[in-house]
Image (cartoon, rainbow, N blue to C red):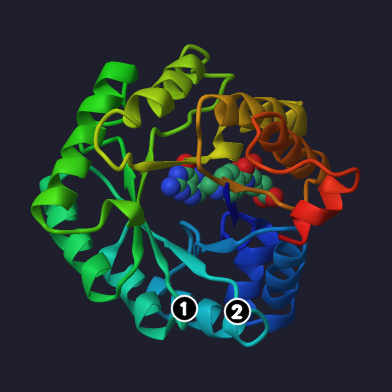
Amino acid sequence: MLVIGELINGMYQNVGKAIKTKDKSIIQKLAKDQTKAGASMLDVNTGPASAQPKDAIKWLVETIQEVVDTPLALDSTKADVIEEGLKLVKGKAMINSTSADDDKLNTLIPMAKKYNAQLIGLAMDKKGIPRDRNQRSELALKIVSACMEQGFPLEDLYIDPVVLPVNVAQAQGVEVLESIREFKLLSDPSPKTVVGLSNVSQGTKNRSLINRTFLIMAVGYGLTGAIVDPLDKELMDGLITAELLLNKNIYCDSYLDAYKKK
Ligand code: THG
């Protein structure tokens, strides 16, 4: 499972403030702590409020790379902001994300090729958030086809079925789970799958429990990547145990420690 740490996101108050005041210590602590907790990639998002997102992403990438080598997922709806980050990233980066819209696909797939980056394709388009599994698979197929036409390696593609909060979109949970299974049939090799897990619990009172339960279920449906809070120890332990029970890891008595160390 590709574990992507979600905590460097301007949506969080402490991170938004750190970006404004150029406080490196907060960002660098989050980079180190998430990596130590088992994240194998870090999501980097300047947040919706950032007035100068290009400057902000440059500063974030440089600040993070001063203290860790963990690969970065550059998370923005603006292609030019992502490209500013890509220019500075040292290892193999991830573009988070393109939608299924033609203009986005025609900008971000070539960008991913140019910088040899991985790419997340969201199963949504300008018409809005998908209604059910069929609409998600239709949009996912459009993304997979565009990657094939443009010669982008499917090994580097992750499709995101778009997770919605359970308190306002309760029927979408099972649609997302079934989509994860259906996406695997779209190509050979199958596209990988990723979710923004914490979306599912936004606005609820049992965030950690809801996140953990949904993640374990999604692993059962074949999920291969997740943007999560890796500092949630019970979440990480549940994830590692789910993969163990699916025979993806080899059992030993100290498997939790062993798999956290990678
Ligand atoms: N898919 C992809 N990328 C994504 C998402 C996705 N990136 C962003 C997001 N969704 C995943 N990351 C987060 C990060 C934080 C929260 C949810 C998802 C979150 N934040 C608190 C909240 O809104 O309640 C912030 C609270 C605070 O201020 O402390 O829940 O789906 N590809």
Q: Is residue 237 above or below residue 74?
A: above
**Amino acid on which the number 2 mark rests in the picture:** Asp
Tell me if 153 is positioned left or right of 207 in this view: left
Tell me the residue at 58%/31% (across/down): 219
Number of the label disc, if any, that sits on residue 42:
none
Tell me if 141 is positioned left or right of 259 in this view: left
Report x, y in % for residue 53. Answer: 41, 71
Q: Residue furthest top?
A: 171
**Amino acid on which the number 1 mark rests in the picture:** Gly
Asked whether the beta carbons under mark 1 and mark 2 sit within 8 Å of each other, the answer is yes
Tell me the residue at 25%/22% (across/down): 135
Tell me the residue at 50%/62% (across/down): 45
Secondary structure category for the residue under label 2? loop
Q: CA distance from mark 1 to mark 2?
A: 8 Å
Is 103 in front, or is 10? 103
Q: Which residue is mark 1?
A: 91
Report x, y in % for residue 183. Answer: 33, 30
Q: Is mark 2 within 8 Å of ligand 1?
A: no
Crowding near the residue tagged with mark 1, few <14, some 14–19, many ≥20 C-alpha atoms within 10 Å = some
Task: Residue 62: tell me if it is visible.
Answer: yes
Report x, y in % for residue 17. Answer: 65, 69
Crowding near the residue tagged with mark 2, few <14, some 14–19, many ≥20 C-alpha atoms within 10 Å = some
- Image quarter where the C terminus lies is bottom right
Q: Residue furthest right?
A: 253
Number of the label disc, if any, that sits on residue 69:
2
Tell me if 173 is positioned left or right of 156 in this view: right
Disc with the residue nearer the chain's start (1 vs 2): 2
Residue 25 lies in what quarter of the image? bottom right
